[in-house]
Image (spheres, helix red, strand yellow):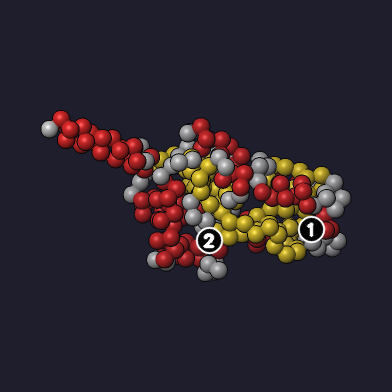
Amino acid sequence: MKKLITLISLVTMCITLFAGPALAKDKLIVGCDTNFMPFEFKQDGKYVGFDIDFWAAIAKELGVEYKLQPMDFNGLIPALQTGNIDVAIAAMTIKSEREKVVDFAYPYYDAGLIILVRADEKNIKSLEDLKGKNVATKLGTTSADYAKKNAQAKEVKLYPNIDGAYMELATGGADAVLFDSPAVLYYSKTAGKDRTKVVGPLYMGQSYGIAFPQGSPLAEQSSIAILKLMENGTYAEIYKKWFGTDPK
């Protein structure tokens, strides 16, 4: 009988340990960068965007409650490492340096980098034309790393939020913005319409992923949920809502 009680206790302990954060916490803390249209932004006092809707669908599939925690993009991974947040969704590119310190779920969006210039710009048509120019982008991102290594720019100006880079372009402080294609395309069709234009091809194809602390069972659980949402059409509905087309 003592052996049976011990065995039951061990099984109960294992279930508690491996159920993971999804069951151990009343609410997950989900870090997000809410200044990245159309993925995450604030509108009429509410957080909206593709990432916001998609995470809501994932959380429903997982049966978990959560609270959004807005923060600067470059603070997301440190917050995961210290346990201050349980999840980070912010159109974050999956790359080796990040994979070393956090776990990613199944990729949910394919993108790349693209160049934005003022509408009257005639001399910048590709990455090669950025040599000796001032290029603006967002701090702590793949685009910042890429610009420093490949643009041969006079200066790469970095901003906590991409709006700062767009403003620098508008005021003449930068000759171009190099940043993630979905955000740049959205801006060029909305706030930057008639004042900016996109030039050149897509550079450095990349995939976005939802990040978790290393070893979190939520990474695998979320991967399964993402695949289910892609299979049942929910992902396509959310995608079309924010990008106007079906997923490619």
| Element assignment for label 2 | helix
Badge 1: how crowded within 10 Å, few (<14), some, or many (20+)? many
Where residue 180 appears, as percent x and y from the top left, is 65, 55
Q: Residue at x 35, y 46 (%)?
A: 64
Q: Tell me which numbered mark, 2 or 1, is placed earlier along the sequence.
A: 1
Where residue 68 appears, as percent x and y from the top left, is 46, 42
- Foreground residue among 79 and 54: 79
Report if residue 187 is visible in the image: no
As drawn, is 126 to the left or to the right of 208? right
| Element assignment for label 1 | helix
Name of the residue lying farthest toward the top? 2
As drawn, is 209 to the left or to the right of 14? right
- Foreground residue among 215 and 153: 215
Q: Taking 207 as reference, is 15 above or below it?
A: above
* Comparing labels 2 and 1, the label whose residue is closer to the camera: 1
Where residue 194 appears, as percent x and y from the top left, is 72, 62
Q: Quadrant of the N terminus?
A: top left
Q: Taking 184 as reference, is 213 above or below it?
A: above
As drawn, is 134 to the left or to the right of 59? right
Q: Residue at x 73, y 58 (%)?
A: 115
Query: In the rendered image, which residue does mark 1 sit on?
Result: 127
Where residue 85 appears, as percent x and y from the top left, is 47, 37
Badge 2: how crowded within 10 Å, few (<14), some, or many (20+)? some
- Amino acid identity at mark 2: Trp
Q: Quadrant of residue 229?
A: bottom left
Query: In the rendered image, which residue does mark 2 sit on?
Result: 242
Q: Residue at x 86, y 61 (%)?
A: 123
- Amino acid identity at mark 1: Leu
Q: Residue at x 45, y 51 (%)?
A: 55
